[in-house]
Image (cartoon, helix red, strand yellow):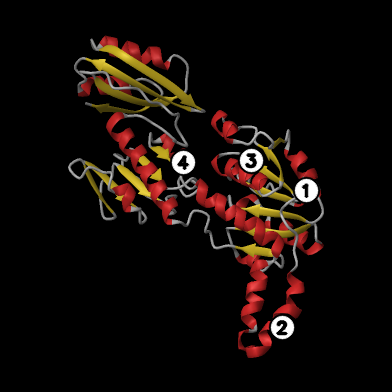
Amino acid sequence: MYNIKLLNKISPVGTALFDKSVYNVGEDVENEDGILLRSADMHSYEMKENLLAIARSGAGTNNIPVNDCAEKGIVVFNTPGANANAVKELAICALLLSCRKISDAIVWAKSIAGEGDAIPKMVEKGKGQFVGPELAGKSLGIIGLGAIGAKLANIARSLGMTVYGYDPFITVDAAWQLKTDIRHALSEEEIYANCDFISMHIPCNDQTRGKFCAETFAKMKDGVRIINLARGELVNDDDMAAALESGKVACYVTDFPNAKTLAMPGAVCIPHLGASTPESEDNCAKMATEQMIDYLENGNIKNSVNFPNVAMERSAGSVRLCVIHRNIPNMISTVSAAMAAKGINIENIISKSKKDFAYTVLDVVGDVSDATLQHLYEVEGIIRVRVIK
């Protein structure tokens, strides 16, 4: 029986996939083998020794100590693309909000609610203060062409925009999804120099935190409109406030309000609604659960942020060994030798690495005893060994 702890409310579309005869699932579960969560902060969470995997129902994993988990042999999953359509639709809304002054106009319209029969004339007189440009004929730069960025690029073309896309790490699948007339920017600077609108779809890490700052804004067109539905920390708020005040940035739409952005004239703050659709929550929960089940029952890894993707069909009549280890030379031969020393035959093996860590799956025939496992743990660099029968 596997114990699965829920740190947030998870859509039942996902949790219903757990076989109740195999999994004990709930918010009060103890000695958890797996954790499902959305936005709960795990940086101070006391992780049990038997914890094998954490699945984030969503794309970002800033709320999880990913590197610490890798050191402990805990696989962290996310669900890239599961909420892509929801965020894409909000990005379209954000483009319109950035140029048509819709949110300010709605607030003003509500302010004249008590004016009775005078309202129609007041509307006609007051609407001029909310004039804004159309999207058609303008240029949009998209930084990050993953599941969300690619979808936004295609629909922006359908709206009559010229679209520049930049992503040095674009996958083959993402590239195939792009319309052929999306312009391939060779650098971020090319987007800054040419685009009336810029939408960012990149992760926040040590290399990208605060990258949209005074130096970056100076390279952009005057009156640029910036959309941030990715992570608030990508933008230097003080520099953004100054850019809005000077007119360098005409509007900043962010899905991550804070005390500074809420006080900025020219900023449109959305209360983190990017993935807030029932369809998105269902899709993320389903993907997270499926990945958790496949790892616990078969040792396969898909969409992990700290270990490589590894999948291998089960060999009939064999026992599966799942070995998490450091990415160091001769590890596979060392593990193979350790198996041979115990008289265990390897039928199939697959091994892949991701930065400092690696994952090896072996289907073996023979007696995998506690002594065998102890023998493996004595191999330098091995972090965790798991047996699946």
Q: Are marks 4 and 3 in contact (CB under 8 Å)?
A: no
Q: Which mark is residue 207?
A: 3
Q: Say what amino acid the circle numbered 1 marks.
A: Glu
> Which residue position is annotated with label 4?
66
Q: Secondary structure at mark 1?
A: helix
SS label for mark 2: helix
Q: Look at the numbered disc 4 and give the secondary structure of its residue.
A: helix
Locate residue 187, reporting x and y percent.
73, 36
Q: Residue at 47% of width from left, 57% of height from top? A: 276
CB under 8 Å between discs 1 and 4: no
Q: CA distance from mark 2 to mark 1?
A: 43 Å
Tell me the residue that label 1 is attached to. 215
Please identify the quadrant where the N terminus is shown: top left
Q: Nearer the viewer, residue 73 or 285?
A: 285
Q: CA distance from mark 4 to mark 3?
A: 16 Å
Work out whether mark 2 precedes mark 1 in sequence or the reverse, and give the earlier one: 2
Query: Which residue is under mark 2?
Result: 122
